[in-house]
Amino acid sequence: MAARRGGRRPAACSRPRNRPRSPGRPRRGPGSVAVIAADPRVGSLAGALQAAGLPHGAPGSDARLTLVPVTLSKGLEFDHVIVVEPARIAAAEARGLHRLYVALTRAVSRLTVLHAGPLPAPLRAR
């Protein structure tokens, strides 16, 4: 589900090599992937990624796979975003649905929502 003006689908874009990167934007190479989860889940997800042999970094690193606590996701962008257990993000604090919205809009070209529990009401099909 994407809310974009004109009904256009998300698409990857590039900038000329000689054009400087905007200040405040972390450097992301082609194919950057972020796993965004509720802050309390990040530690266990880091352990699972490490056990699976998947190298990852923290926000601001040049790692292809970045593990991001939802509270740090604002202002970041990635080619592919995987949002883990959106209901836990929504329930974690009073601003939980706002944080979930931010997480769901970090993807430039691809979004995956990974959940075992029910989705929060705003994400359920009507």
Image (spheres, rainbow, N blue to C red):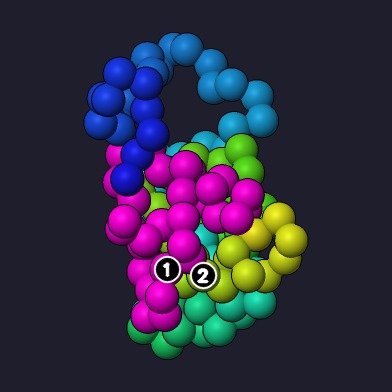
Q: Amino acid at mark 1?
A: Leu
Tell me: residue 27, above or below residue 112: above
Name the spot of residue 1 as percent of width and height, x first: 32, 45
Residue 82 drawn in magenta: no
Disc 1/disc 2 C-alpha distance (Å): 6 Å
Which residue sits at x=48%, y=43%?
106
Dots 1, 2 in contact, CB < 8 A: yes
Q: Which three-letter amino acid code belongs to the residue tagged 2?
A: Ala
Q: Position of residue 20 (x, y in %)?
A: 53, 16
The label on residue 95 is none
Q: Quadrant of residue 107?
A: top left
Query: Who's the residue at 51% across and 61% down the image?
Result: 36
Question: Which residue is drawn at the image coordinates 51% and 78% (left, top)?
Answer: 45
Question: Pointer 2: what residue?
Answer: 87
Residue at point 63% right, 70% down? 91
SS at mark 1 in the image: loop
Q: Quadrant of the C terminus?
A: bottom left
* Mark 2 residue element: helix
Residue 40 as seen in the image, left or right of residue 118: right
Region in magenta: 97-126
Q: Residues within 10 Å of mark 1 (few under 14, many from 20)?
A: some
Q: Is residue 50 above or below residue 18?
A: below
Q: Is residue 56 above or below residue 52?
A: above
The image shows residue 119 at horizontal and vertical percentages of 42, 68
Instruction: Choose between 99 and 45: the one closer to the eye.
Output: 99
Judging by the rendered image, the residue that carries numbered circle 1 is 119
**In the image, is residue 123 part of the stretch drawn in magenta?**
yes
Which of the pair 18/31 is nearer the observer? 31
Count the numbered circles shown. Answer: 2
